[in-house]
């Protein structure tokens, strides 16, 4: 289905996206080291998802910073033999790319996740869903088979969107509404035997998800 995404020149001024911060969240970004709000959803005997609502304090501030400073790129992908635009922008912070500095907060997030889940979280990227037409189709993250049961964490910023999970090729079994600051961690066999998606919707403001993965 999906082939590798190929970067193309980013178009459009992302900083001008219609963005209405919530009234109460102008705090400095800070993840919740206590993980107090986390709730585990057991998908089956081998796969699970943790959801911690509001885990990242200051989500609106972080949203505004990333919107302006992240290295957003448009890309294209081959879908059923046709080259189409990927319906979202993606920013990557590879270790070896000296010109793009990772925001220091990412290191704090990584440390907290590694302490809690006892696994390395060694890659970070972000998705920008500009409006309700942007989405991510059903997929499991493509992580080398050498990584046993990879963990994938996402932090949601900006407007709320629905996050769906289904057994590979099956019907939706979990639907979470992800609001600003929510943390999701998918674990066990969830990337191998389950799929996840952010479906298109008739209307939505911009949303960013930061994805932190055990992928090397
Ligand atoms: O935006 C999200 O919450 C999910 C992102 C995702 O599925 C991905 O980056 O592979």
Image (cartoon, grey):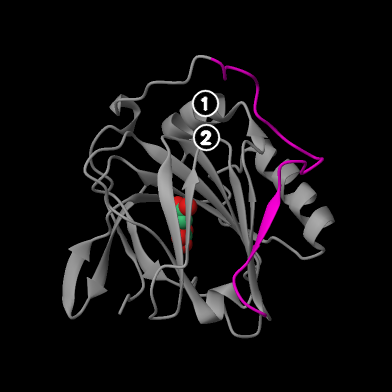
**Of the pair 97 and 53, the residue shown nearer to us:** 53
State whether residue 198 appears in this view. Answer: yes
Q: Is residue 9 left or right of residue 126?
A: left
Give the mark, 2 or 1, whose residue is nearer the N terminus: 1
Residue 57 in the image: state x and y as whole percent: 65, 29
**Of the pair 106 and 140, the residue shown nearer to us:** 140
* Range covered by the magenta-colored residues: 24-45
Tag 2: Cα neighbours inside 10 Å, few (<14), some, or many (≥20)? many
Please state the total of marks drawn on the protein image: 2
The image quadrant where one finds the N terminus is bottom left
| Mark 1 sits near ligand 1, with its Cβ under 8 Å away | no
Which residue shows up at 26% across the image and 47% down it?
A: 201
The image quadrant where one finds the C terminus is bottom right
Which residue is tagged 1?
60
- The image quarter in which residue 185 lies: bottom right
Magenta span: chief secondary structure: loop
Which residue shows up at 59% across the image and 71% down it?
A: 43
Which residue is tagged 2?
180
Q: Is residue 32 left or right of residue 62?
A: right
- Residue 79's mark? none
Which residue shows up at 62% across the image and 36% down it?
A: 54
Outermost residue, bottom direction?
145
């Amino acid at each position: 289905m999906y082939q590798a995404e190929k970067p193309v020149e980013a178009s459009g001024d992302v900083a001008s996206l219609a963005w209405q911060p919530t009234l109460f969240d102008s705090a400095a970004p800070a993840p919740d080291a206590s993980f107090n709000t986390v709730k585990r959803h057991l998908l089956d005997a081998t796969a699970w998802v943790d959801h911690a609502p509001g885990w990242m304090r200051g989500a609106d501030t972080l949203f505004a910073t990333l919107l302006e400073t992240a290295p957003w790129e448009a890309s294209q992908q081959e879908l059923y033999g046709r080259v189409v635009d990927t319906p979202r922008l993606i920013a990557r912070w590879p270790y070896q790319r000296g010109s793009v500095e990772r925001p220091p907060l990412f290191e704090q997030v990584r440390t907290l996740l590694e302490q809690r889940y006892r696994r390395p979280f060694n890659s970070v990227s972000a998705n920008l869903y500009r409006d309700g037409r942007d989405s991510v189709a059903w997929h499991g993250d493509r992580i080398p088979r050498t990584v046993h049961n990879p963990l994938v964490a996402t932090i949601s910023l900006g407007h709320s969107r629905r996050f769906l999970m289904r057994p590979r090729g099956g019907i939706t079994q979990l639907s979470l509404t992800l609001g600003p600051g929510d943390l999701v961690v998918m674990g066990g066999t969830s990337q191998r035997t389950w799929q996840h998606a952010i479906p298109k919707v008739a209307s939505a403001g911009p949303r960013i998800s930061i994805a932190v993965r055990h992928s090397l």
